[in-house]
Amino acid sequence: MARGQSALDSPAQLTRALHVTVAAPEHPLQCRCGTVKGFVRRPKRLTRCICYCKDCQAFARFLGRGDEIMDAQGGTDAIQIAPADVTFTQGKEALACLRLTEKGLLRWYAACCKTPIGNTPANSRLSVIGLVHSCLHEGTSPHGASSPEGGSRGGAASLDAFFGPVDVRVNTKSASGRVKSQPIALAWVIVRFAAMLARARMGGHKPTSFFSAAGEPLVTPKVLSRSELNRLQSFSP
């Protein structure tokens, strides 16, 4: 059974279980221009949220693709899974990495077309990545087929079918419009996310598509200056 079901499961978890039991074993991943391609194996554990924090908004603006990445209220759809579930089949050399601050998350993207890939902790032992929806294209063959160059990202239906529905909306106070907070759903997600991190730490460091065997990021991150970050966070459409 995909994801355990019990009387304590949230509605989102129950809906996800119904979806992912019929999903394909892999989901295609690619950048907008098609230089970077790969796939995501069906995760054993995941959470999915829409984040409205100023940092995620700043990342989208840094890439110059805010309208494509964020929803109307400034939220980014991100799916938290193990980095080991992500495999690149081509274009890995085009990966770039950004840190908004010297101690911030590693924010990975395709330098060729500024498509966001996902966010990881700098500590490779905290083995989790928040995949940004923009790199998850629709398609039936993750090892070869791709969306047309310049095409849009995989639709919500495609993501729902593979990863299940959004669990929660977080950091809603930073939204540009009214977004209802979800404290109960957030509590469930925090518990599940903490469990994911605990399992990752027990497993120790393993090389992934983002970190070397020594636990170092495969790309040296660019760190924004304070003025650059302030400009991106204070941006108003």
Image (cartoon, helix red, strand yellow):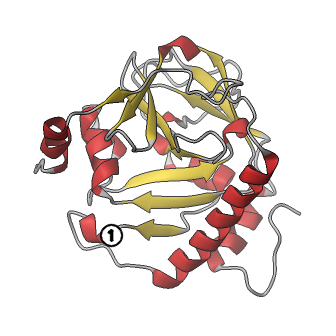
Where residue 121 appears, x then y in whole percent?
53, 44
Quadrant housing residue 12: bottom right
Q: Secondary structure at mark 1?
A: helix
**Which residue occupies 34% across, 49% down?**
56
Q: Name above or below for residue 141 compared with residue 27.
A: above
Q: Which residue is mark 1?
A: 172
Q: Residues within 10 Å of mark 1 (few under 14, many from 20)?
A: many
* Tally of numbered tags: 1
Q: Nearer the viewer, residue 37 or 85?
A: 85
Give the percent coordinates (x, y) of residue 220.
45, 21
Q: Nearer the viewer, residue 98 or 182?
A: 98
Q: Nearer the viewer, residue 109 or 144?
A: 109
Task: Please report the residue visible at 68 percent of the width from the left and 25 percent of the height from the top.
Answer: 214
- For the view shown, which residue lies furthest in the right direction? 1
Residue 162 at what x, y percent from top left? 68, 50
Q: Position of residue 163 (x, y in %)?
A: 65, 53
Q: Image quarter for residue 16?
A: bottom right
Residue at the image position 12 percent from the left and 47 percent from the top:
235
Q: Is 146 positioned to the left or the right of 117 in the image?
A: right
Depicted 167 relative to depicted 207: above or below: below
User: Residue reaching furthest bottom?
Assistant: 7
Q: Which amino acid type is shown beneath numbered disc 1?
A: Thr
For the N terminus, which image quadrant? Answer: bottom right
Q: Quadrant of residue 226?
A: top left
Drawn side of residue 127 relative to residue 221, left or right: right
| Front-lying residue, 235 or 19 | 235
